Image (cartoon, rainbow, N blue to C red):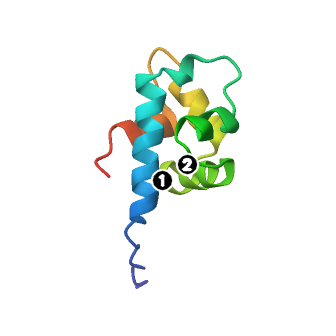
């Protein structure tokens, strides 16, 4: 039988940034902005585009585009919903 590989707990900085990203997406309704870019989101959370992208990839398990597209529907689905419903 194959042994399970233990997974490391997420970095506290990534958790905080993902909380900020989710908060900005909801409170400022950034998901409603047509053409929302990584630059817009990075500015909203006082970070840079690389860190925002890496954070979404690691914490949500999807790309920035998939994250944003999943958040903009009337009934959010995909990785945005996964993040919204998780308790980091």
Image quadrant of residue 65? top right
Name the residue at 67% across, 17% down.
34
Q: Residue at x 61, y 41 (%)?
A: 42
| Residue 12 falls in image quadrant | bottom left
Q: Is residue 1 above or below residue 12?
A: below
Position in image of residue 73 (x %, y %): 52, 18
Would residue 72 be visible to someone looking at this image?
Answer: no
Q: Indicate whether 82 appears above or below 69.
A: below
Quadrant for the N terminus, please.
bottom left
Residue 56: image tag = 2
Work out whether residue 17 or residue 86 is closer to the camera in this orientation and state it.
17
Left or right position of 54 against 75: right
**Residue visible at 48% across and 36% down in the picture:** 80
Q: Is residue 63 left or right of residue 80?
A: right
Q: Nearer the viewer, residue 42 or 11?
A: 42
Q: Which residue is mark 1?
A: 59
| Number of other residues with Cα within 10 Å of mark 2, as a class: few under 14, some 14 to 19, many 20 or more | many
Is there any visible trace of residue 51 in the rendered image?
A: yes
**Proximity of marks 2 and 1: CB atoms separated by less than 8 Å:** yes
Is label 1 in a helix, a strand or a loop?
helix
Residue 21 in the image, given as x and y percentages of width and height: 48, 39
Tell which residue pokes out farthest to the left in this image: 87
Q: Residue 18 appears at what percent x and percent y?
A: 45, 47
């Amino acid at each position: 039988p194959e042994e399970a590989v233990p997974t490391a707990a997420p970095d506290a900085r990534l958790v905080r940034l993902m909380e900020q990203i989710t908060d900005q997406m909801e409170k400022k309704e950034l998901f409603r902005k047509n053409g929302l870019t990584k630059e817009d989101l990075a500015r909203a959370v006082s970070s840079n585009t690389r860190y925002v992208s890496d954070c979404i990839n690691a914490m949500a398990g999807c790309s920035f585009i998939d994250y944003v597209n999943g958040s903009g529907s009337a009934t959010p689905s995909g990785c945005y919903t996964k993040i919204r419903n998780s308790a980091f």
